[in-house]
Image (cartoon, rainbow, N blue to C red):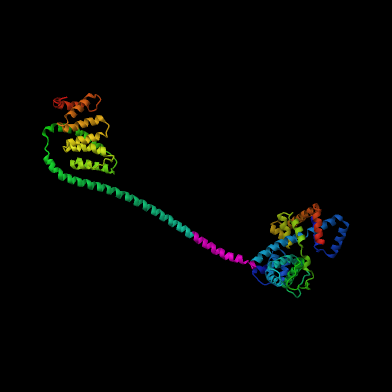
Amino acid sequence: MFYILCVMGKSEYTDQEVINAIRQGGPTRQMAWEYIFKQCIGTSILEIIKMGGTRNEALECFNEVAIPLEKVMRKPQFRLNSATLKTYITKCVKRRWLRLQKIRSKEPSKPSERDVFIDDAKENVERQIMGSELREAVDMLINTLGERCRRVLRMFGQGYSMEQIAEAEKWKDADKAKKEKYECQTKLKEYLRKNPGIANHLKELLYG
Amino acid sequence: MVDLSLHEKIETYLLGLMSREETAKFKEQIKNDPQLAEEVELHRLILPVPDRLAEIELHRDFKRWYEEIFPSPTQRIISKAQKRLISIFIIMLLIIFCVFLIWNFMAAQRAQQKQLLSELEDIKLENQGIKEELSRIQSKLDSVLQRSEPENEKKPKIPNNSEYVKLAEEGLMAYAEYMVESFRTRSVHSTLVGEKLIENADTAIQKGQFREAEWMLRSVSTNDRWHPKSLEILAFVQFKLQKYKEAIDTYEEYRKYNRDKDKTDWDLCLFYLGDFHNYKQQVKRLLLSIREDLQHPKRNEADVLYNKIQDSIGHIQK
């Protein structure tokens, strides 16, 4: 529906339409993210600048909260009861920025806001954010993959169905896509078996 | 390595998509199977990979959309300035190209004009030189004509020389025809002054205008390469004007340029014959030398002449 509305050129969508589009995955998800970004980035930047931050810091925080935000939105129990999606996203960005200031030992120019726990959301987005060390370790794993595996797994991460992946790669059916995904993930597991040190490091980063 | 179905089951379990009962059952399985436990653990470690790949792609999209919303001031300025610069640059190139074409065309025109002007100047100079020479000759001729008529009236013909003159003329006419004919048969149209004068003198000789011819031939400069030729013809012309002594002097002058003694001895002999009474000794000497020379080309003519005048020569004391 969201896809059709985008194609028809509708410019305003309800929060539920956007969330549904994210959950749908694939190209619809892409359009939904473009809408979210263009709606929310201005406000997020303003809020960060008000607190003494910069435009780049606002963008960095937005980058970091995007995928965890998507994971939270995908859960069936996710609901926005009183706040709008825009408000929710902006607050996530602000919270992330505050956390980063604490990590970098910088004092913000204005008194820090208390951590806002949005009653509407049962999950804390902050918890889902991938740390930089974990990101580096995962990037190292990604470097062992070929271009096709990266495409398949990326589409899987973006919420594409097997049928959508098969269509994108011009394969005959979804079984082929499943098989490719399985083989790519098996390669990664084999790599970790052969490199137990990397596996242990990943374990530490994931579980602490 | 596990099969596809188990692989998917592990993923479903790790993503929390199993029902409660299924989850409990699978947990029990993992507990009892260390290999399965290891496989589950490895799968757990690779779970962040698709999310990270999606994150990288999303960040690229965010950057692109950000630049769409907030193009950098320099980008905005550059894009307008770029268009302006490119159009100015193209216009300047066109102007330079046009100027270059026009300059080349005009340079070619100027070069052509210069060449034509220099050729014109050369022709003018040439014509002027010829005109001056002709006017000088004309004025000399006029003055001589005015002077020479009375002289001609004063100088009487020498009747006793007339027979020798006839003999000389017979020999000289053939020579004169050859001398002038060889000049006439040149294919090159004369452009030099001396050559031009000789050409005009030849025209005058054909018309019988020997006085005019004499002054033209006298006008040929001693530095001109046609000077020897002019002397040769002048001697003949002077002979025709009955200026025998002058003809002899002229031909003796000519002999300095011509090394062909066989030819010039005979010709000179004929010229001497014109003034026989004054040049008897010279006539005799030359005739005898020619006759003694068995290889001389004019030996027969010398014999004939000698026979005709031997009485007169015989009377000369040796």
Q: Position of residue A68 (x, y in %)?
A: 76, 66
Specify whether B77 is left or right of A139. left
Is B16 situated above or below A84?
above
Residue B200 colored magenta?
A: no
Total residue callouts: 0
Q: Position of residue B263 (x, y in %)?
A: 24, 31
Is residue A147 in view from this perspective? yes
Is B100 situated above or below B214?
below
Q: Is the C terminus of chain A in the top left, top right, bottom left or bottom right quadrant? A: bottom right
By secondary structure, the bulk of the magenta-drawn segment is best described as: helix
Is B273 situated above or below B218?
above
The foreground one among A89 and B132 is: B132
Res. B256 image quadrant: top left
Residue B91 colored magenta?
A: yes
The foreground one among B147 and A5 is: B147
> What residue is drawn where x is 12% and y is 39%?
B155
Q: Position of residue B190 (x, y in %)?
A: 28, 43
What range of the chain is rendered magenta?
B68-93
Specify whether B53 is left or right of B309. right
Q: Is the N terminus of chain A in the top left, top right, bottom left or bottom right quadrant? A: bottom right
Res. A110 image quadrant: bottom right
Instruction: Name the residue furthest bottom.
Output: A82
Instruction: Name the residue furthest right.
Output: B32
Q: Position of residue B221 (x, y in %)?
A: 26, 42
Is residue B178 in view from this perspective? no
Res. B252 image quadrant: top left
Is B280 situated above or below A105?
above
> What residue is drawn where x is 16% and y is 29%?
B280
Specify whether B180 is left or right of B311. right
The foreground one among A96 and B122 is: B122
